[in-house]
Image: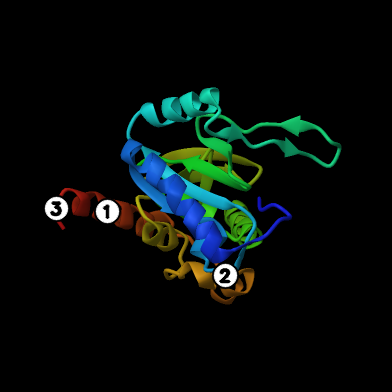
Amino acid sequence: MSTDTKWVRRYAMEQALGFKGMIEKYCDEVMIAGSIRREKEQVGDIEIVAIPRDTTLLAMLDMKEHRGEIRKWRYVDKNGVVSYRWGEKYRGIEWGPIRIELFLADANNWGFIQWLRTGPGDANQQLVTLLKYQNVIRSIDGDVWEVGGTPDNPQPVRKLRVPDEQTWFTLIGLPYIAPKMRTSEIYNSYGVNPLRGEALDKFTAEFVLKQKGMF
């Protein structure tokens, strides 16, 4: 979702750290994602993912917007229609001259949202499309599910907990790939072979035991 204007990475990082410093006391987790995390030298906008501690994060942003300390980013589509993104899970914020997009997650989808918002968008879309047609593991409304049914009519079977990116990559049958290496070509070189059946059952069972300190 980057803008046409590009900023050097150092400047974008300074702005990202400033915003992160403002919100982190309201969050359990905060990560700078997007092209900054992929170590690109030119940055179109800043993407930040966070797990809010409670409702005070959104309340604080609402208060600052009301006072004029921050502004909602003004999105204009190709037809000149203006919109704003100021929801419960996604907000577009004017931070000086640069746009910050804040995406909110929880402990169950944190790893998936990190991966999704790190990008790049074209490579992610390609991988998500491959997963759609394999119809074993799918993202539905920001969460990761084991599914049945058909690609065009998936039937949720169980929600899968994805607390980190390593778990996400394991679920879809890939080794962990560092952010700066994530491209369509890299994903194509490995292919996608999501865990299924007994392998998925075993992985999720072992994960639960690890969380309980029993494995």
Decide if residue 191 is on the left or right side of residue 106.
right
Q: Which residue is mark 2?
A: 187
Q: Quadrant of residue 198?
A: bottom left
Amino acid found under the numbered disc labelled 2: Tyr
Q: Nearer the viewer, residue 185 or 58?
A: 58
Q: Is residue 206 above or below residue 173?
A: above
Q: Nearer the viewer, residue 214 or 98?
A: 98
Decide if residue 162 is on the left or right side of residue 132.
left
Task: Give the farthest residue toward the bottom.
Answer: 189
Label whose residue precedes the other's in the sequence (2 or 1): 2
Q: Quadrant of residue 128?
A: bottom right
Identify the element where label 3 is drawn: loop
Q: Nearer the viewer, residue 30 or 89?
A: 30
Q: How much space separates mark 2 and mark 1, taking CA atoms?
A: 25 Å
- Which marked residue is nearer to the observer: mark 2 or mark 1? 2
How many numbered discs?
Answer: 3
Q: Which residue is mark 1?
A: 207
Q: Which residue is mark 3?
A: 213
Which residue is at a point 50% across and 34% down the rendered structure image? Answer: 89
Q: Residues within 10 Å of mark 1 (few under 14, many from 20)?
A: some
Confirm whether residue 159 shows in the render: no
